[in-house]
């Protein structure tokens, strides 16, 4: 009669079954995979549902409230613009222009871009708002920012993803410092 307890029997059985196993030599751990942080999905109450294909305004004039904005310098790779539209560049700075007059917003944007370039920022977020409170339903800051960002140090910009402000904000891709 065996007087060993069941746990000891299991241990003995395990040891006899793995007695010929040798530990593998490890050459170092594999490099960690870098992944972009997930982009939150918009909730229905956060953002009104956009049409399946929003209109993209590439012209400076006639900007309307629900329009998506997009601009890219000639020669910019399509993949770079696609990554910008998807919000895959890390945002290094943010400027919120809500409630400012057009003149003050232009000055703040100029200072913000100068500081961002001096800090070697690559992608920034400019929040201009959707312009729903404008008396004639023409988004003043949205139209202004669409015009003011067309400068040599800006490679591209496009409307942000709904989680970052949707059509009320822009991802702005800046030139790399030389």
Image (cartoon, rainbow, N blue to C red):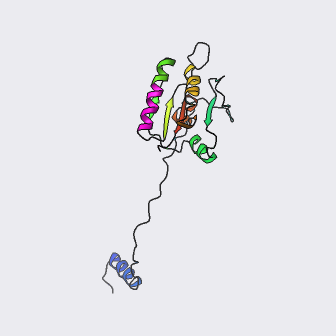
Q: Position of 51 compared to 91: left or right? A: right
What span is in magenta? 108-121
Q: Position of 70 compared to 95: left or right? A: right
Is residue 100 visible in this depiction of the protein?
Answer: no
Q: Residue at image x 55%, y 27%?
A: 148
Q: Position of residue 1 (x, y in %)?
A: 33, 87
Q: Position of 93 compared to 7: left or right? A: right
Q: Residue at image x 54%, y 33%?
A: 170
Q: Residue at image x 46%, y 32%?
A: 113
Q: Position of residue 172 (x, y in %)?
A: 53, 36
Q: Is residue 125 above or below residue 17?
A: above
Q: Position of residue 11 (x, y in %)?
A: 35, 78
Please state which of residues 132 and 107 is positioned toward the viewer in this rendering. Answer: 107
Q: Quadrant of residue 159?
A: top right
Q: Quadrant of residue 41?
A: top right
* Magenta span includes 120: yes
* Magenta span includes 77: no
Q: Position of residue 175 (x, y in %)?
A: 51, 41
Q: Residue furthest top?
A: 135
């Amino acid at each position: 009669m065996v007087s060993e307890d069941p746990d000891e029997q299991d241990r003995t059985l395990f040891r006899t079954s793995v007695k010929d196993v040798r530990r593998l030599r490890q050459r170092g751990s594999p490099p960690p995979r870098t992944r972009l942080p997930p982009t939150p999905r918009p909730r229905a109450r956060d953002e009104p549902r956009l049409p399946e294909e929003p209109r993209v305004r590439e012209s400076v004039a006639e900007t309307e409230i629900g329009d998506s904005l997009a601009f890219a310098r000639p020669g910019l790779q399509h993949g770079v613009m696609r990554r910008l539209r998807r919000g895959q560049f890390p945002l290094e700075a943010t400027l919120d222009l809500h409630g400012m007059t057009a003149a003050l917003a232009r000055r703040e944007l100029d200072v913000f871009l100068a500081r961002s370039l001096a800090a070697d920022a690559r992608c920034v977020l400019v929040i201009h708002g959707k312009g729903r409170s404008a008396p004639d339903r023409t988004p003043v800051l949205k139209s202004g920012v669409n015009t003011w960002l067309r400068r040599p140090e800006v490679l591209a910009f496009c409307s942000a993803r709904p989680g970052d402000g949707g059509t009320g904000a822009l991802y702005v891709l800046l030139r790399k410092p030389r």
